[in-house]
Image: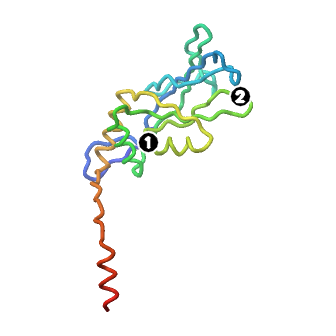
């Protein structure tokens, strides 16, 4: 079920949630004594996908020791207080979709649990114990985020503070 928001001056309703799945790839770690497998994110696929194995990822491709898994049931939520971060992400030279994953102590497999369009949110998880992967934004997700930012964000021009002459202020106080 899509919950929607509509700003008062906007006629179009923009959904708050965008369903998607994540594709993760594992490949053998060559010449690495510390790990056997290296993981990375391949991308995100738009829309809801049926989970065939419950919570387990679906193996979608395998070739020469490299495996790609589909993690379904995820999505992106947009929040008003993150609009500035979405704006800067979309305006950057290489906009990204951030996949946040955790690994269990007994398993090297990163499990995606969050997808975000906010660099600030992804960075906060990166400072913790989560892994963050950046992938290209699918066109549908880009357009949806762009529409949300246009409807809800007004860039504020930052004002440079004027330097104050503290010596002049001190002279005025000492003469009183």
Give the residue furthest to the right.
106
The front one of 168 and 137 is 168
* 76 up-or-down from 176: above or below: above
Is residue 3 shown left or right of residue 156? right
At x 53% / y 46%, what residue is drawn? 124
Is residue 7 shown left or right of residue 96? left
The front one of 19 and 83 is 83
* 48 up-or-down from 78: above or below: above
* 156 up-or-down from 99: above or below: below
The image shows residue 20 at horizontal and vertical percentages of 47, 29
Q: Earlier in the sequence, mark 2 or mark 1?
A: 2
State which quadrant residue 170 falls in: bottom left
The image shows residue 151 at horizontal and vertical percentages of 29, 46
Q: To which residue does mark 1 refer?
A: 118
Q: To which residue does mark 2 refer?
A: 107
Q: Secondary structure at mark 1?
A: loop
The image shows residue 174 at horizontal and vertical percentages of 34, 88
Number of residues whose C-alpha sits closer than 10 Å to that of mark 2, classed few (under 14), some (14–19) or many (20 or more): few
- Do residues under tags 2 and 1 come within 8 Å of each other at their CB atoms? no
* 34 up-or-down from 10: above or below: above
The front one of 137 and 134 is 134
Numbered marks: total = 2
Q: CA distance from mark 2 to mark 1?
A: 28 Å
The image shows residue 65 at horizontal and vertical percentages of 62, 11
Number of residues whose C-alpha sits closer than 10 Å to that of mark 1, classed few (under 14), some (14–19) or many (20 or more): many
């Amino acid at each position: 079920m899509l919950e929607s928001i509509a700003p008062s001056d906007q006629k179009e309703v923009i959904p708050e949630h965008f369903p998607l799945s994540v594709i993760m790839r594992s490949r053998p770690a060559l010449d690495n004594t510390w790990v056997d497998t290296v993981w990375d994110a391949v991308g995100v696929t738009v829309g809801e996908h049926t989970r065939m194995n419950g919570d387990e990822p679906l193996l979608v491709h395998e070739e020469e020791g490299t495996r790609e898994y589909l993690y379904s049931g995820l999505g992106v939520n947009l929040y008003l207080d993150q609009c500035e971060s979405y704006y800067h992400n979309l305006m950057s030279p290489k906009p990204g979709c951030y996949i946040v994953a955790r690994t269990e102590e007994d398993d090297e497999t990163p499990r995606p649990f969050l997808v975000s369009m906010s660099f600030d949110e992804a960075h906060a998880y990166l400072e913790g114990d989560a892994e963050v992967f950046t992938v290209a934004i699918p066109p549908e997700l880009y357009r949806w985020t762009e529409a949300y930012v246009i409807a809800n964000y007004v860039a504020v021009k930052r004002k440079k503070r004027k330097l104050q002459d503290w010596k002049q202020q001190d002279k005025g106080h000492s003469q009183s």
